[in-house]
Image (tube, rainbow, N blue to C red):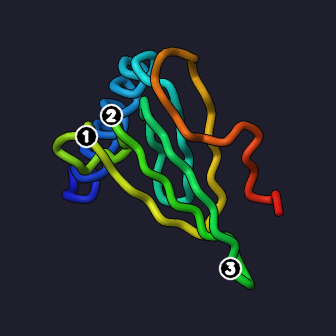
Amino acid sequence: MSHIDDLEDYDAELELRLKKEYATVFGMFRFCVLTAEATYLCNRLEMSRTDQPSYPFVHLVMEDVWVWDKNRPSRIIPRTEVHTTQDVTVEELKTGDVDTTLPIGFELGDE
């Protein structure tokens, strides 16, 4: 077996572990946030948009976060901020007593 095969097997094993972890923790979170850079699960979300002349600028603040990244030693993050000019998709997974300032009906195409 070559070193390339070993690396491919290792990468496949990391991906499988990540998918299993995602399935295990998914029900513990209120929001699923997808950006071009990453996928996040979180329980508190604040999102704001500032339109620029040629693109929208989205600022996300998330707390109690799980991030999809197979190369991180720990995927749980207490708080993170994301700034992006790309599309953002937010899915509310469950309702609850978790406070959020996410505007209802917020879409990047709104002006």
Badge 2 element: strand
Residue, x 33% and y 25% (percent of image)? 21
- Report the label total: 3
14 lies left or right of 48: left
Q: Nearer the viewer, residue 66 or 96?
A: 96
Query: Residue 101 appears in which quarter of the rendering?
Result: top right
Residue that carries the numbered disc 1 in the rendered image: 78
**Label 2 CA crowd tier, 10 Å (few <14, some 14–19, many 20+):** some
C-beta proximity under 8 Å, tags 3 and 2: no
Residue that carries the numbered disc 3 in the rendered image: 52
- Which of pointers 2 and 1 lies earlier in the amino acid sequence? 2
For badge 1, the amino acid type reads: Pro
Q: Nearer the viewer, residue 47 or 92?
A: 47
C-beta proximity under 8 Å, tags 2 and 1: yes
Q: Position of residue 106 (x, y in %)?
A: 73, 46
Query: Residue 10 appears in which quarter of the rendering?
Result: top left
Residue that carries the numbered disc 2 in the rendered image: 64
For badge 3, the amino acid type reads: Gln
Residue, x 74% and y 57% (percent of image)? 108
Q: Residue furthest bottom?
A: 53
For badge 2, the amino acid type reads: Asp
Query: Residue 76 appears in which quarter of the rendering?
Result: top left
> Can you say whether 104 is above or below 93 in the image?
below
Residue, x 62% and y 53% (percent of image)? 88
Tag of residue 4: none
